[in-house]
Image (cartoon, rainbow, N blue to C red):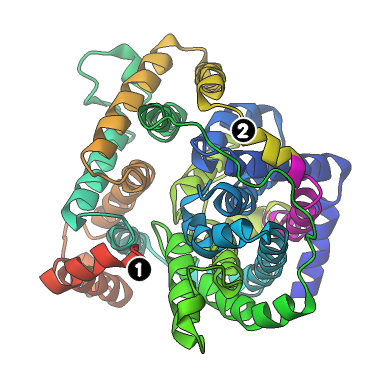
Amino acid sequence: MDLLGHLLLGLQVAITPTNLLFCFIGALLGTLVGVLPGIGPAATVALLLPITFTMSPETSLIMLAGIYYGAQYGGSTTAILINLPGEASSAVTAIDGYQMARQGRAGAALGIAAIGSFIAGSFATLVIAWFAEPLTTVALKFGPAEYFSLILLGLVASTALAHGSVLKALAMIVLGMLLGLVGTDVNSGQLRYTFGVGELADGLGIVAIAVGVFGIAEIFRNLEDEQEREVGVKTVSELMPSATDLRASAAPIARGTVIGTILGVLPGGGALLASFASYAIEKKLAKNPSRFGKGAIEGVAGPESANNAGAQTSFIPMLTLGLPANAVMALMVGAMTIQGIAPGPSVITDKPELFWGLIASMWIGNLMLVLLNLPLIGIWVRLLSVPYYILFPGIIAFSAIGVYSVASNVFDLYTLAAFGLIGYLLVKLGFELTPLLLGFVLGPMMETYLRRAMVLSRGDPSYLVTEPLSAALLAATAGLLCVLLLPSVTRKRSEVFVEED
């Protein structure tokens, strides 16, 4: 079947009434968690994992995907209106978007953000459809050694995009891998690292850990810095940008789309890096760079396009290789596992309706987001005035209910509380939490492939470097690690996410 035939199959799946409904619900929830700072898509997806038990695989992934890319849209609303990004990747949007709002041009900023996001998301979805099948064909030729080396490369690469120290990011990966080893050894059937606690026989729950470190820990952090959010823009009008604004934004949207599409596949936070890269490029190309930081519409159009394209293309490694590029993709791998589907290249051949249905739903979801975000701006503005101390009890209650409903096990609530505290302490100590979750999800997978490789080689570790592709991946991993640890690169990394004054 050719690409057009696959897309028609996906469209048939995506436009069923149930899937359309849950695509809308996902987009709406994603926008909501993007608008309300302190919740985030990772915690929301983790909370909703239990309800996917009752859904078909296609419906559950369509809804969860809608939450993820919907949050990118919603995050720009708070960034523009109150200078508080709902999502980290919207931080750059706040630089010029908030200044536009202060100048009475909030409508134009929100409008161009929505238009750029829609164009970028649609283009990135087309790229996924175009390249996913060839990449899957290549991935099917991977053996255990190649997969082990690829996962190792992905874990090391994720540290490049983590804030702060490389060593701290590597420590988080190792901690996540150790947590992933808790439970029953699938080969020997022996318990390991359970310390006599029977509830740990099946391992730690990904939902409890994810909600703890991304939800509860974030609540602690927000309460620590709690302050009244003042919405300077009470009403927003003229959402359609002028012809001048559209002409000024056309090239930045195109460049941001390409940058985000390329960088989005990087593990650890490609969408975040893409938005900063887009802003830096637009500032360099501008005839008058001094306009940036004072309400330049190009500073909204480029980064918003880049982060939405990056959010979409982060699905590529998850769909083709079964390897998550960020925390939300790790949770979606968990959702597929819950449904009894082994993530990886076999999905496109074994479950074509799931694969292509998800891709087709992204186009529909992006259109829904444009129709949702602009008319409902007034509602989002009113929501922003709700004090956080009113929101957080409900967030904690839903977190506890969601975690408990996975296995009806009180021990999961203790795990939730423990990792909420651990996550808060780690953030205070300057550790990045995303590498921890990636290590937790990918660690057991890496162990499995390593064991299979050792079985094939009869225990000879040189097998990992005698296979050409595996050796190349390991060499790339070693080279990347050496580069990251160079003092000059360490200094540059600390400056990447800091905008010039």
Sequence order check, earlier mark of 1 and 2:
2
Q: Quadrant of the N terminus?
A: bottom right
The image quadrant that residue 215 belongs to is: top left
Give the percent coordinates (x, y) of residue 360: 75, 59
Q: Determine whether, in the image, residue 378 is placed left or right of residue 330.
A: right
59 or 472: nearer the viewer? 59
Q: Can residue 311 be seen here?
A: no
Taking the image as shown, residue 133 lies to the left or right of residue 481, namely: right
Residue 385: mark in rendering: 2
Residue lying at 52% horizontally and 12% vertically, measured from the top left: 408
**Which percent across, then down, holds residue 157?**
31, 63
Q: Separation of disc 1 and disc 2 at Cα? A: 29 Å
Task: Say left or right for 330 vs 101.
Answer: left
Residue lying furthest front: 103
Q: Which amino acid does label 1 sit on?
A: Asp
Image vertical order of residue 152 relative to residue 210, above or below: below
Badge 2: few (under 14), some or many (20 or more) residues near its Cα, within 10 Å?
A: some
Q: Magenta span covers which residues?
A: 355-378
- Residue at 54% x, 63% y is 307
Q: For residue 501, which numbered disc appears in the image?
A: 1
| Type of the residue with mark 2 | Ser
Question: Dot 2: what SS?
Answer: loop
